[in-house]
Image: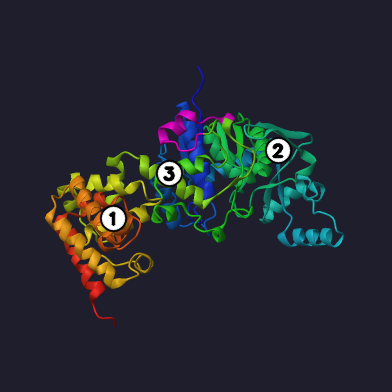
Amino acid sequence: MTTPPRLRFAPSPTGYLHVGGARTALFNWLYARKTGGKFLLRIEDTDRARSTEESTRAIFDGLTWLGLDWDEEVVFQGANVARHQRDAHRLLDSGAAYRDFTTAEALDRMRAEAESRGVPFRFDRRLAELPPDEVAARLERGDPYTIRFRVPEGVTGWDDLVHGPIEFPNKDLDDFIILRSDGTPIYNLAVVSDDIAMAITLVMRGDDHISNTPKQILLYQALGASLPTFAHLPMILGGDGKKLSKRHGATAVGDYGALGILPDAMCNFLALLGWSPGGDREVMTRAELIEAFSAEGLLKKAAVFDTRKLEWMNGQHLAQAPIEALDAYLRPFLVQEGLTTGEELEARRDWWRRLLELLRVRARTVTELVEQCRPYFLDAVAYQPEAVAKQWKDRLATAELLQAVHDRLAAAPWEAQAMEESLRALGEARGVGAGKIFQPMRVALTGVAATPGIFDVLLAIGRDRSLARLDAAVAHLTAPAG
């Protein structure tokens, strides 16, 4: 029987949860959920100077917003330093590592000398390894030292799930430090020690970690541990082909929620940055992503973060989401804007759900959807200058038309068919098409030129409020200038 895989997401709490980290977390989560494995979270907080509680909370909040739930308790790497030190000394005792008493000043001189000769700096093990009696004497004196891993001869390679076979000649690797002179572990040792302790079987991360992998494989082997499988995901680029950064706009996952992106849409979008489900499918639910996800679909080529594509995809999710889920997600935004209360929405649930069905197909973001909801909750509307300039060019003629519309609607049953027949008859009597009537009406009723069908708008706003807005528009258009 195959053991279910164990994967982890291991961010450093030195900033927000950025898009690249969120994509890595998502791929690990999808793989775990698809295979019945475990998705674990480890906070790599050994850099005490840069790690903050605020960043840790931001990571938790970002993952929670995305709906990426983790299994088992969160592991904090900083709590495992004693084990990291024991593993370093195990390597020391086995001869796989050695103490290096070279001072920082001496290393700086060596680097400067190499630079002056125009050659890359390479650490020379012969200058660092000392006879046992001298090591004992220095330890007796309390001289500071680092512990370096002794890189063996040969080649280190692995079969990457994304890139296929990768090899590094060991001669290109310096004997690397695994424990600093103050006893704190270096990244590669801490990662390997923790992954062994957590029984991680698949390490899926960004391809900027490829250069770390041969060092980590050597540590696994020297510690006598089984190697996990490695998968290195492609970089995410901005639209200009450069690595995604703040200059391309929001890169913190939490920022996209504030900008009106749905969590499911964000997951869908991120999933397609470095993975393909095959065929031409793009818009997928969370369940469909889990069902389709596989390592075979992982791509080597760098992915491009296209904000317009994200907004388009978000619009698709707004249009297709279960109405109950969209209602629950949108309510806090409406309340925060002061448009309504939870109690009012509950009391008018049927009306609200009909309005939501009407509006959601026209919005790309939750922010846009909230704005489109505004005219249906407020007693009065603000007229958009662009809409006024286009649809109310002749103020007095428009006022006379809207007054006629008001009178027709006031006399008609408040039903779509009856209102349409009455207004089309008005158009025929005046010798104008229906659009010449409906467009000025839209501005009077909602303040904007683009709305759902005009009779849907009238029914959603209601008889009394619609007639009052037509009256207000007439008064506005006939008021003295200035």
Q: CA distance from mark 3 to mark 1?
A: 21 Å
Q: Residue furthest right?
A: 117
Q: Where in the figure is residue 246, as x and y percent of width and height?
A: 54, 59
Q: Nearer the viewer, residue 330 or 61?
A: 330
Residue 373 - label: 1
Instruction: Give the residue drawn at x 21%, y 60%.
Output: 405
Hey, what amino acid is under mark 2?
Ala
- Residue 44 visible here: no
- Badge 2 is on which residue? 96
Q: Give the mark nearer the N terminus: 1 vs 2.
A: 2
In the image, the segment drawn in magenta is 281-296
Viewed as shown, does residue 190 lie left or right of 365? right
Q: Where in the figure is residue 108, as x and y percent of width and height?
A: 75, 61
Hey, what amino acid is under mark 3?
Ala
Q: How packed is label 3: few (under 14 Cα within 10 Å), some, or many (20 or more)?
A: many
Query: Comparing marks 1 and 2, which lies closer to the viewer?
Result: 1
Is the residue 240 above or below the residue 482 in the image? above
Q: Where in the figure is residue 325, as x and y percent of width and height?
A: 30, 41
Hey, what amino acid is under mark 1?
Cys
- Badge 3 is on which residue? 265
Q: Nearer the viewer, residue 60 or 281?
A: 281
